[in-house]
């Protein structure tokens, strides 16, 4: 682990680990989730069998296990009074390039994580202690999950660093109508050449990349402001709230109003 930590140090100014949300409690029943950021779960046990399933397979989530759910990963949950904590976070490079996107569910068991997980749900802990604990917990799991992937992280960074000006532009122009033509102009390239190069470098199209940034921005507005769905739709350049709702449901699996209600209950 020390070797990986040392290897990651040169990228530490570019890799961003940003805490989004935290949940601790008991889940029951069957439901589907999908978020634009990663989720790290730790099980404190369940009355029956708890299973999480994606398109690649299923994981039986047992006491003492951690489970890392990548962003934009649709997961089916089957909980029988499962008590767990869930940390929502972004692990990105250049503001918006989620390094875990496209990966399968990752899981493991590390006995030394149990005391750290327990400390996160200690009501006597101060806010600074809690935030430091969340950061440490996430980093410990990421180091373990990405132990053999440092070379790949370097390659991801080298591919995306050339688009630093573009990602900055997109974050300053979070409007749905922002076009691939505008993106190509920022990169001083022809539209077709830019689209081919970007897709080859990143594995996704420029439009899909931008829509992921938009989806995360929509989540921020829904969970961090009192703006109505109609106001958010207007702020983000959608013609109307119904078009925005269809966009949001396509990316997050839920209508924006229902998503806000669920996140309010979690928070």
Image (cartoon, rainbow, N blue to C red):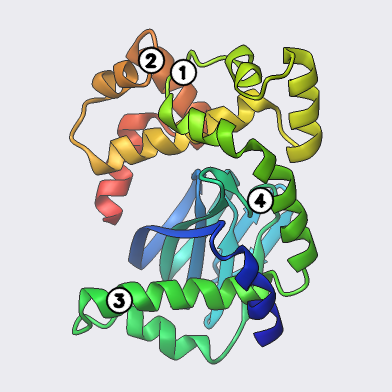
Q: Which numbered disc, 2 or 4, marks the residue closer to the eye?
A: 2
Disc sitting over residue 237 in the figure: 2
**Neighbour tally class for label 2: few under 14, some 14-19, many 20 plus, Cα within 10 Å:** some
Earlier in the chain: of badge 3 and badge 2, it is: 3
* Residue pictured at 53% horizontal, 83% vertical: 64
**Neighbour tally class for label 4: few under 14, some 14-19, many 20 plus, Cα within 10 Å:** some
Residue 10 sits above or below residue 168 on the image: below
Residue position marked by numbered label 3 in the rendering? 130
Residue position marked by numbered label 4 in the rendering? 54
Q: Which numbered disc, 4 or 1, marks the residue closer to the eye?
A: 1
Pointer 2 and pointer 1: residues touching (CB < 8 Å)? yes
Q: Horizontally, is 265 left or right of 207 in the view?
A: left
Pointer 4 and pointer 3: residues touching (CB < 8 Å)? no
**Neighbour tally class for label 1: few under 14, some 14-19, many 20 plus, Cα within 10 Å:** some
Q: Position of residue 147 (x, y in %)?
A: 72, 75
As measured in the structure, the alpha-carbon distance from the residue carrying label 4 to the one carrying label 3 is 30 Å
The answer to whether residue 253 shows anywhere in this view is no
**Neighbour tally class for label 3: few under 14, some 14-19, many 20 plus, Cα within 10 Å:** some
As measured in the structure, the alpha-carbon distance from the residue carrying label 3 to the one carrying label 1 is 36 Å
* Residue pictured at 43% horizontal, 34% vertical: 254
* Residue pictured at 74% horizontal, 30% vertical: 198
Q: Quadrant of the N terminus?
A: bottom right
Residue position marked by numbered label 1 in the rendering? 176
Q: Position of residue 223 (x, y in %)?
A: 29, 42
């Amino acid at each position: 682990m020390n070797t990986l930590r040392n290897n990651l140090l040169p990228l530490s100014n570019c890799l961003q680990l940003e805490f989004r949300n935290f949940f601790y409690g008991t889940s029951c029943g069957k439901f589907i989730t999908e978020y634009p950021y990663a989720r790290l779960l730790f099980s404190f046990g369940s009355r029956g069998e708890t299973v999480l399933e994606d398109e690649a397979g299923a994981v039986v989530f047992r006491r003492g296990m951690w489970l890392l759910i990548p962003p934009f990963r649709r997961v089916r949950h089957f909980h029988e009074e499962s008590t767990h904590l869930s940390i929502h976070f972004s692990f990105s490079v250049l503001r918006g390039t989620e390094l875990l996107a496209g990966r399968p569910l990752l899981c493991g068991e590390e006995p030394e994580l149990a005391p750290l997980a327990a400390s996160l749900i200690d009501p006597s802990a101060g806010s600074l202690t809690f935030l430091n604990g969340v950061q440490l917990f996430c980093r410990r799991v990421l180091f373990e999950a990405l132990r053999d992937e440092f070379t790949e992280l370097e390659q991801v960074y080298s591919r995306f660093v050339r688009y630093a000006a573009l990602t900055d532009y997109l974050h300053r122009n979070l409007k749905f109508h922002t076009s691939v033509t505008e993106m190509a102009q920022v990169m001083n390239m022809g539209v077709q050449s830019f689209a081919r190069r970007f897709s080859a470098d990143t594995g996704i199209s420029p439009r899909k990349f931008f829509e992921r940034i938009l989806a995360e921005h929509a989540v921020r507005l829904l969970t961090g402001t009192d703006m109505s769905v109609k106001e958010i739709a207007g702020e983000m350049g959608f013609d109307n709230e119904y078009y925005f709702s269809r966009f949001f449901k396509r990316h997050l699996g839920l209508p924006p109003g229902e998503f806000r209600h669920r996140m309010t209950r979690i928070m």
